[in-house]
Image: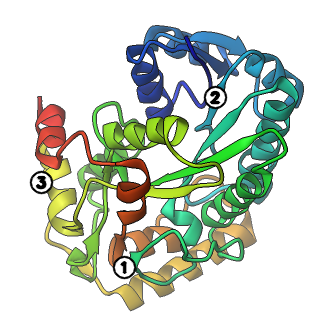
Amino acid sequence: MSTAFVTGGSGFIGGALIERLRREGWDVRALARSDAAAEKARVRGAEPAPGDIEDRGSVRAAAEGADVAFHAAAKLGDWGDPDEFERLNVRGTENVIAACREAGVRRLVHVGTEAALMAGQPLVNVNEDAPLRPDSPVLYSSSKAKAEQRVRDANGAGLETVVIRPRFVWGKGDTTLLPALVELVRSGRFRWVGGGRHLTATTHVDNTVEGLWLGATKAPPGGVYFVTDGGPVVFREFVSQLLETQGVSPPDKSASPALAGGAAVVTEHVWRLVRRPGQPPLTRFAVWVSSQECTIDVSRAERDLGYRPVRTRDEGLAELAA
């Protein structure tokens, strides 16, 4: 029987991953930095291991005896303290890599993101050859780009590394994206940017986990793979369907991309200048996601891993509505 070590096991992707690994018959140990995180991991079927990705020693102890490690922990969001993004996403990933080497873990599967390629431009039918953007003005994008590069550079010398990149992860158990969208609509602050008619890729959490499973069991060392739900969808149509599963209908109000983008730059500058607490009402990353095409070529995962979605969008939406 194989043993897996998981960071971020109390989160959306990490929790679903634990359940899949347990169904496959694996033992799972999950890093937990609080009693609440430990309980979430335990409920999913993992053995909690006290520790934090900022503490390399605790990560090493938790990884001891594991065959495969999955790194799903990350600082999410499009705003925050630059040092926190650097500490958690970059140095935290460095700690996980070092701990896996020291603990003798054979393979590390890293949860990447298409955001690591974003610096303000649309992503049109991109594949894994598109360059990472550690120079992105958005902290999440730049820090995840740096983290992924660390993982890719670490492949070899006793540790195999694989990167799996889902896009727009959604589904049952989401505690971030869909609740935030619902709150925006209910507060009257929701706007479509440029009408929201652009195409976007999506990845149901079950399809994300399928990609991670294949990354652990079939991917060649050093591999980088996108996974999605299949063909793209119109952003406005899909977001409307998501909201409708929660009994919420989005308004028809819209803002121009130029106006929204300019307002985001000004708002971010003011927030930084006066050190205002909390999140600005509008950010550049939110404008990019809401107004720019993001379509992805997953042919490499299909060819190399035999990847196919295990959950359709209709099935995922029906589950959310239920």
Q: Which residue is mark 3?
A: 249
Q: Residue at x 28, y 48 (%)?
A: 308
Determine contact: label 2, label 1, CB under 8 Å: no
Q: Which residue is mark 2?
A: 68
Question: Mark 2 against mark 1, which lies toward the viewer?
Answer: 2
**Which amino acid does the dot numbered 3 rest on?**
Ser
Residue 227 picture location, percent across and down:
39, 54
Helix, strand, or loop for circle 2? strand
Relative height, residue 190 to residue 156 (above, below) = below
Relative height, residue 138 to residue 160 (above, below) = below
**Which amino acid does the dot numbered 1 rest on?**
Gln
- The answer for how far apart the CA atoms under marks 3 and 2 are is 43 Å
- The answer for how far apart the CA atoms under marks 2 and 1 are is 36 Å
The answer to whether 293 appears left or right of 237 in the picture is right
Helix, strand, or loop for circle 3? loop
User: Which sits earlier in the primary sequence, circle 3 or circle 2?
Assistant: 2
Q: Which residue is mark 1?
A: 292
Residue 289 picture location, percent across and down:
40, 69
Give neighbour class at mark 3: few <14, some 14-19, many 20+ (Cα, 10 Å): some
The answer to whether 74 appears left or right of 58 in the picture is left
Tell me if I can see residue 299 in this picture. yes
Q: Quadrant of the N terminus?
A: top right
The answer to whether 198 appears left or right of 12 in the picture is left
User: Which sits earlier in the primary sequence, circle 3 or circle 1?
Assistant: 3
Relative height, residue 105 to residue 43 (above, below) = below
